């Protein structure tokens, strides 16, 4: 019994090595495995880069723009970060869906090389297309969600005139005249504040005229 155990211990590794050397792996299987790994890596890299970019943007907006410079409101920060998250999420879904589909088609048509190429090209095209479509739709939706005008400049203009961005033109006009009278330099007001009020009114007026023109052209 002991002799059998010794033989197994002494010769086991040699036998195992001989078996391993005689096993032949199909080159096609290796190529398909490599192509699949590359495709998986690409599908993982895309969301990691996208969500990493969101973290950088959020830090920039919160620390530099909102806390340090104070030239952006908290609502704008929340909107922009939320918009970016939704766009990246949509891009990732589009990239994975198109990349998988194009990779499968490429693999059937031309083998592993076409599988990788189709996956990368399809992923890029799907991600870009989904991101562009989502950015337009999400921007409109989150304007209502966060109750904000289309741009930061308009938000500042409405804040200067102390009116809501959905206020009637008559309300905006009354607010402008009231503040302009209070801050007019000839009345002892601050010249810079008076100019800011005038600029804000012109920005709002131009934006509303543009909006009315776009509506009339539909």
Image (cartoon, rainbow, N blue to C red):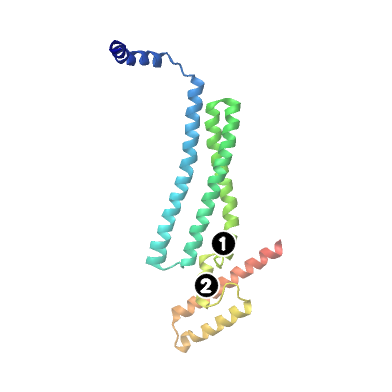
User: Which quarter of the figure is the C terminus placed in?
Assistant: bottom right
x 53%, y 50%: residue: 89
Residue on which the image places disc 1:
142
Label 1–label 2 contact, CB within 8 A: no
Q: Vertically, is 7 above or below 70?
A: above
Could you tell me which secondary element the residue under label 2 belongs to? helix
Q: Please name whichever residue, 203 or 88, is drawn nearer the observer in this view of the structure.
A: 88
Which residue appears at 54% of the width and 40% of the height? 123
Q: Residue, x 56% and y 83% (percent of image)?
A: 177
138 is higher (above) or lower (below) than 120? below
The single residue placed furthest to the front in the displayed view is: 1
Residue 199 visible in the picture: no
Q: Which quarter of the picture shows residue 20?
A: top left
Q: Earlier in the sequence, mark 1 or mark 2?
A: 1
Instruction: Using the image as rendered, state which of residue 133 and residue 156 is in the foreground.
Output: 133
In the image: residue 142, left or right of residue 6? right
Side (left or right) of 28 relative to 64? right
Residue under label 2: 157
The x and y percentages for residue 188 are: 44, 88
SS for tag 1? helix
Instruction: Name the spot of residue 130 as percent of width and height, x first.
Output: 58, 47
User: In the shown orientation, is residue 9 left or right of residue 95?
Assistant: left
Distance from the alpha carbon under mark 1 to that under mark 2: 19 Å
Q: Is residue 113 visible?
A: yes
Q: Which mark is residue 24?
A: none
Residue at 51%, 21% in the rendered image:
28
């Amino acid at each position: 019994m002991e002799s059998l155990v010794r033989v197994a211990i002494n010769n086991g590794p040699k036998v195992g090595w001989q078996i391993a050397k005689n096993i032949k792996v199909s080159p096609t299987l290796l190529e398909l495995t490599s192509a699949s790994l590359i495709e998986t890596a690409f599908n993982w890299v895309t969301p990691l880069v996208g969500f990493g970019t969101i973290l950088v943007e959020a830090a920039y907006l919160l620390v530099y723009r909102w806390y340090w410079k104070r030239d952006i409101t908290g609502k704008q920060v929340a909107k922009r970060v939320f918009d970016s998250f939704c766009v990246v999420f949509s891009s990732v879904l589009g990239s994975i869906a198109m990349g998988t589909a194009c990779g499968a088609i490429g693999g059937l048509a031309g083998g592993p090389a076409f599988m990788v190429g189709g996956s990368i090209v399809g992923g890029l095209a799907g991600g870009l297309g989904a991101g562009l479509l989502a950015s337009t739709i999400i921007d409109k939706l989150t304007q209502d969600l966060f109750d904000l005008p289309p741009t930061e400049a308009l938000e500042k203009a409405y804040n200067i005139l102390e009116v809501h961005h959905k206020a009637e033109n008559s309300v905006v006009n009354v607010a402008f005249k009231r503040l302009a009278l209070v801050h007019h330099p000839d009345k002892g007001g601050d010249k810079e504040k008076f100019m800011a009020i005038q600029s804000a009114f012109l920005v709002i007026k131009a934006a509303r005229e543009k909006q009315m023109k776009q509506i009339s052209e539909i």
